[in-house]
Amino acid sequence: MKLLLDFLPILLFVVTYKLSTIYVATGVLMVATIVQMGITYAIERQLTTMHKMTLGMVLVFGALTLVLQNETFIKWKPTVLYIAMALAMCIAMWIMKKNYLKLMLGSQLELPDAVWMRLNVAWMLYCLFMAGINGYVAAYYSTDEWVNFKIWGYVFPLAFMVGQGIYISRYLGTEQTAEADAADKQA
């Protein structure tokens, strides 16, 4: 259900684009994201920082696209969002000495600190990769090709999530976590 809710605004954006224009699709994306966040808030009684960043950027870049009638803004929104996420994780980790992922997910997952650190670095690199690839497609390909990339490009986050799941699966469970923590401290 959550995955469908996360995917719904981009799906509606692509379908609307195929049936209409980038500007109508951008308006649909903005409304769908507001509805998505409303449903998320109704279910979870809060919005994460990531939710707030996504909503803010969709609304700002969407408004710029519509007001200025320039599709460049909506095409570059994912790049800016991914760079902002990577920077936030980097600043949190190296300047504030906090692990952003652990702060967000620590109540749901019990993992050794070394694993949290590796996951945080992996997420930073993933965000930079996604920023780069979206930026490249936005800059060098047509809007039609960019919209197609928005759908087919979901192979990257899916592959990343599966890889991350495989990586952390060996650390799940209190006995394994304690053993992994001890092994990480020795290493």
Image: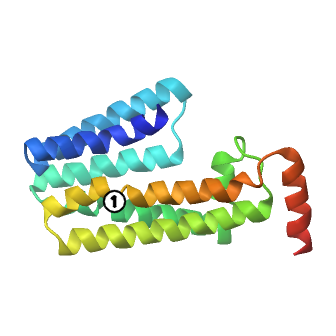
Would you place residue 9 above or below residue 149 in this image? above
Q: Nearer the viewer, residue 149 or 42?
A: 149
Left/right placement of residue 28 relative to residue 169 reads: left
Q: Tell me where residue 7 appears, x and y as whole percent.
A: 37, 42
Rate crowding at label 1 as few (under 14), some (14 to 19) or many (20 or more) other CA atoms within 10 Å. Answer: some
Q: Tell me where residue 34 appears, x and y as whole percent.
A: 33, 35
Residue at figure coordinates x 34%, y 30% from the top left:
35
Say which quarter of the image contains residue 68. bottom left
Q: Tell me where residue 25 appears, x and y as whole percent.
A: 16, 44
Residue at figure coordinates x 17%, y 63% from the top left:
145
- Evaluate whether residue 96 shows in this view: no
Placement of the C terminus among the 4 image quadrants = bottom right
- Evaluate whether residue 105 shows in this view: yes
The figure's colour scheme reads: rainbow
Which residue is identified by label 1? 153
Residue at figure coordinates x 36%, y 48% from the top left:
56
Say which quarter of the image contains residue 15. top left
Q: Secondary structure at mark 1?
A: loop
Q: Nearer the viewer, residue 2 or 173?
A: 173
Left/right placement of residue 122 relative to residue 27 reads: right
Residue at figure coordinates x 28%, y 42% from the top left:
11
| Tally of numbered discs | 1
Q: Tell me where residue 106 appears, x and y as whole percent.
A: 71, 47
Q: Which residue of the protein is positioned furthest toward the top in this rendering?
A: 42
Q: Amino acid at mark 1?
A: Gly
